[in-house]
Amino acid sequence: MSSKRVLITGVAGFIGSNLLDFLMEETDWDIVGVDDLSTGNRSNIESHSDSNRFTFHEMSLFDIKSLKPYDVVFHLAALPRIQPSFELVNEHVKANLLGSTHLVEIMIRENHFPRIVNSSSSAIYGTPENIPTPETERVDCLSPYAFQKYETEKYFDLLATRFPLDFVHLRYFNPYGPRSFNPANSFNAYSSVVGIFLNCWEKGKTLQITGDGTQQRDFIHVRDLARANYMAAIHPKKLNTAFNIGNSSTMSILDLAKLISDDYTFIPKREGEADITYSDVTKAKELLGWEPKHDVASYIQSVKS
Ligand SMILES: NC(=O)c1ccc[n+]([C@@H]2O[C@H](COP(=O)([O-])OP(=O)(O)OC[C@H]3O[C@@H](n4cnc5c(N)ncnc54)[C@H](O)[C@@H]3O)[C@@H](O)[C@H]2O)c1
């Protein structure tokens, strides 16, 4: 495996910092991370601060001027919260769409096209018709956030008809794992439900289930996501396509709550959220050689013991 020079945008967030851990452990690559710390946390990446293979810049990705030093760009910086995207619309367009097109514009200007591994989302399927859901599912964005993720994909697809872009869209399902819940983040009520429930359990608080809890989610461990990013980065061919990255299983929110605590209550359903997510990951298995290795019940057991 040849060494690579890579950039991670959003490195101090939940998934970015877990990707950093993975790449530091599994590769000898030189890694630059940028994050404006708008929702991320410096403590998430502190364990690598003394490494001579990792450099962190506290800055907005809009201040990135050149991508020439990189072979791969892992693009994770975003404001990934469904409910706030309904109200703070421009802020979310800027973070979720314009941030991505800013990177592509730099590539076009420099005529340098590193592989870009773009973090997309299963939110673009809305409540899908086909269960499990393949990448060919019709798109039905139920929130501005979902629409911005979809627009980003479409800009890449469209611009690749004129410029030699080299990209992979990874449509994550419902990630969980270490650092998913950031108490300092003012949007944390909309972060991953596994993290929210575990945080309530740790604090001795009642778990709040939205709706009747029958909505189902495909929970995917963040380490599996990190490995999917890695596999997308090292694939020898230009792919320019999207992959579902989920566990290919589903669990109701009520059953998830019961795994964590018997102290739970119900609060009103939130609009803009899918009734079910359940990935078909055949394409990722066949083309990337990736498949999930973790399950949520074992993770909860390990946190609670
Ligand atoms: N967590 C999920 O449920 C989920 C699901 C599907 C897809 N995704 C996608 O995965 C990616 C990472 O999500 P996450 O859960 O780690 O979110 P996160 O909020 O923990 O991390 C995002 C990071 O981006 C940083 N950031 C935001 N705007 C920035 C800017 N302009 N410049 C530099 N840094 C900026 C934030 O400070 C934060 O550290 C996002 O693209 C998100 O849309 C997340």
Image (tube, rainbow, N blue to C red):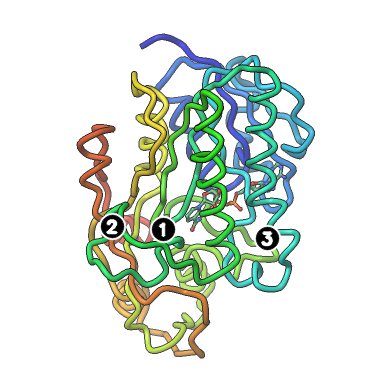
Quadrant, the N terminus: top left
Q: Is residue 19 above or below residue 248?
A: above
Distance from mark 2 CB to nearest ligand 1 atom below 8 Å = no
Contact? badges 2 and 1 (CB < 8 Å): yes
Secondary structure category for the residue under label 1:
helix
In primary-sequence order, the first of circles 2 and 1 is 1
Disc 3 marks a residue whose amino acid type is Asn
Determine which residue is flagged by label 3: 185
| Residue at the spot 46% in from the left edge and 72% down from the top edge | 201
Determine which residue is flagged by label 2: 279
Across and down, in percent, residue 58 comes to 76, 35
Distance from mark 1 CB to nearest ligand 1 atom below 8 Å = yes
Query: For mark 2, does the 10 Å Cα neighbourhood hold few (<14), some (14 to 19), or many (20 or more) residues?
Result: many
Residue sticking out furthest to the front: 162
Across and down, in percent, residue 65 comes to 76, 25
**Near-viewer residue (282 or 43):** 282
Determine which residue is flagged by label 1: 122
In this rendering, the label closer to the viewer, 2 or 3? 2
Q: Is residue 166 above or below residue 171?
A: above
Q: Is residue 297 above or below residue 251?
A: above
